[in-house]
Image (tube, grey):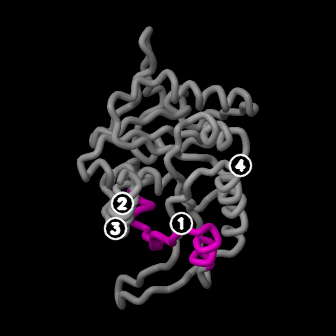
Amino acid sequence: KGGVGKSSLTAMLAVEFARQGLKVGILDADITGASIPKLFGLPAGGLRGGDMGILPAITPLGIRIVSSNLMLKEEDTTVAWRGPLIAGMIQKFWDDVLWGRLDILLVDLPPGTSDATLTVMQNLPINGVVLITTPQELSGLVVRKAGHLLERLDIPILGVVENMSYFRCPGCNQEYSIFGTSHSKKLATDFNTNLVARLPIDPTIAQLCDQGKVEQVQLPEMTQLVNQFTEIKKEADS
């Protein structure tokens, strides 16, 4: 679903994995609406290439990133491409980028289930997908479409993350459900997975992301979330 925080969650997951000593990459598959470079403060035109392939941009924490916005002269330049061009660029990011040795590659998908999503699901060796939603039932409705696609393609759903779940009052520490009653637990149950995290509304996170300082975000829920994914991976490997 658009606007639920897919890119910011992808970035924060990458940061937390990197803090735990893993070698992490991000493939920004949202070709026409790329925002990953902005979150990390990476300038436009930050990709370099040669005869061997494309070198990803690298953040201070060592996260390797490729994105269409790193190929533009200005970050707000319009990318108005049709499906085949988008699919071709995603495939190029996978085939031609010199990723090096990674422990995990995160793919930030655009909203919906169109060409970009299908290209990733059908052409890349995906181990699992995280569904990101917000408390509203309307958000869940759109996310279900993605869930049904994953079921048809037999791709594991690692869990559901509910973003913007609540606001915690800094004075009294009470939680307020700004967007109403959550429907995410039922969403997770319907797809035979778990609601693995409920993330709060935190103005500090928004400010740091706007400033390109996502690597400075400290959110205890993200540490817990990464630990859960690590356990899931251990179980799958065993």
Q: CA distance from mark 3 to mark 4?
A: 29 Å
Residue picked out by circle 1: 160
Specify the quadrant of the image occupied by residue 116: top right
Is any atom of residue 40 visible in this view?
A: yes
Q: CA distance from mark 4 to mark 2?
A: 26 Å
Q: Residue at x 45, y 86 (%)?
A: 175
First in sequence: mark 4 vs mark 2: 4
* 20 over 52 or under it: above or below: below
First in sequence: mark 1 vs mark 3: 1
Residue 90: where, in percent of width, then height?
59, 31
SS at circle 2? helix
Residue 67: where, in percent of width, then height?
51, 34
Asked if the residue at tag 2 contacts the one at tag 4, i.e. Cβ–Cβ closer than 8 Å, the answer is no
User: What amino acid is at disc 2?
Assistant: Val
Q: Is residue 197 magenta?
A: yes
Q: Residue at x 55, y 36 (%)?
A: 124
Q: Mark number for residue 113?
A: 4
User: How many residues crowd around disc 2 within 10 Å: few (fewer than 14), some, or many (20 or more)?
Assistant: some
Asked if the residue at tag 3 contacts the one at tag 2, i.e. Cβ–Cβ closer than 8 Å, the answer is yes
User: How many residues crowd around disc 4 within 10 Å: few (fewer than 14), some, or many (20 or more)?
Assistant: some
Residue picked out by circle 2: 226
User: How many residues crowd around disc 3 within 10 Å: few (fewer than 14), some, or many (20 or more)?
Assistant: some
User: What amino acid is at disc 3?
Assistant: Gln
Residue picked out by circle 3: 224
Q: CA distance from mark 1 to mark 4?
A: 17 Å
